Amino acid sequence: NAGVTQTPKFQVLKTGQSMTLQCAQDMNHEYMSWYRQDPGMGLRLIHYSVGAGITDQGEVPNGYNVSRSTTEDFPLRLLSAAPSQTSVYFCASSAGSNYGYTFGSGTRLTVV
Amino acid sequence: GQQVMQIPQYQHVQEGEDFTTYCNSSTTLSNIQWYKQRPGGHPVFLIQLVKSGEVKKQKRLTFQFGEAKKNSSLHITATQTTDVGTYFCAGPLVSNYKLTFGKGTLLTVNP
């Protein structure tokens, strides 16, 4: 039981490049979310999903896309990377609103 | 806008001292969750409180949910160096699907 797996752990991008951050969970959780963490800003919700085929925007969705074709996977796509997207990205999953979230170990992204 | 506020932002204590962090929401919450993040690590779920006035304990940690369900606190008795990290509260401000986090309280412990 691996929990929430995020890849890659580290990534450096050039401005304008695109990439996909991968997230997979093996706990059959319906809820999945992407957060970004910046110094002094806490964790801010980017996008979330309450089940396969259902996604919605969080607090800071601009510049990011998501899809949820299966219960297990919830990839986050950066369309055209900008230096403002330099951050640590966490994927998290939960069995529902009465349960806590399990977080992945994070992806540290630097955009130069 | 609606938000979850935490104070203090930082707290430095001597090992053995007590520590408390406070969380306030701009709106009534159906529940509140607490997480701990060790330096360089990821947030780890500690507990969820649901009922008005609820108090839960986990060893040296005591969690409270206010009567109006708009505030919460985490109290650590006799801190240890293993308690070092950032403590976050989080609540569903807008909907049950969107968990909003406070900015956290960074606890450092001097041995």
Image (cartoon, rainbow, N blue to C red):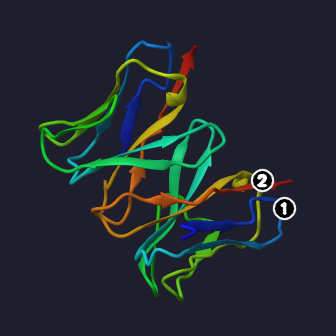
Inspect the image, locate mark 2, and give the three-letter code of the amino acid beneath it: Pro
**Label 2 belongs to which residue?**
A83
Inspect the image, locate mark 1, and give the three-letter code of the amino acid beneath it: Thr
Crowd around label 1: few <14 · some 14–19 · many ≥20 (10 Å): some
- In the picture, which quadrant includes the N terminus of chain A? bottom right
Tell me if B16 is positioned left or right of B59 in this view: right
**Is A33 situated above or below B7?**
below
Query: Could you tell me which chain the residue with mark 2 belongs to?
Result: A
**Is B60 situated above or below A49?**
above
Residue that appears at 20% across and 47% down: B28
Tell me if B79 is positioned left or right of B72 in this view: right
Secondary-structure class at tag 1: loop
Q: Which callout, 1 or 2, points at the residue further toward the start of the chain? A: 1
User: Where is residue B91 shown, x and y percent of the image?
Assistant: 33, 50
Q: Find out whether the residues at labels 1 and 2 contact each other: C-beta distance under 8 Å.
A: yes
User: Where is residue B3 shown, x and y percent of the image?
Assistant: 37, 44
To which quarter of the image does residue B64 belong?
top left
**Is B74 situated above or below A59?**
above
Tell me if B105 is positioned left or right of A67 in this view: left
Secondary-structure class at tag 2: helix
Residues A41 and A70: in front is A70
Labels 1 and 2 within one chain: yes
Residue A94 appears in the rendering: yes
Q: CA distance from mark 1 to mark 2?
A: 7 Å
Residues B13 and B5: in front is B13
User: Where is residue A66 shown, x and y percent of the image?
Assistant: 58, 76
Residue that appears at 46% across and 87% down: A53
- In the picture, which quadrant includes the C terminus of chain A? bottom right
**Label 1 belongs to which residue?**
A15
Residue B1 appears in the rendering: no
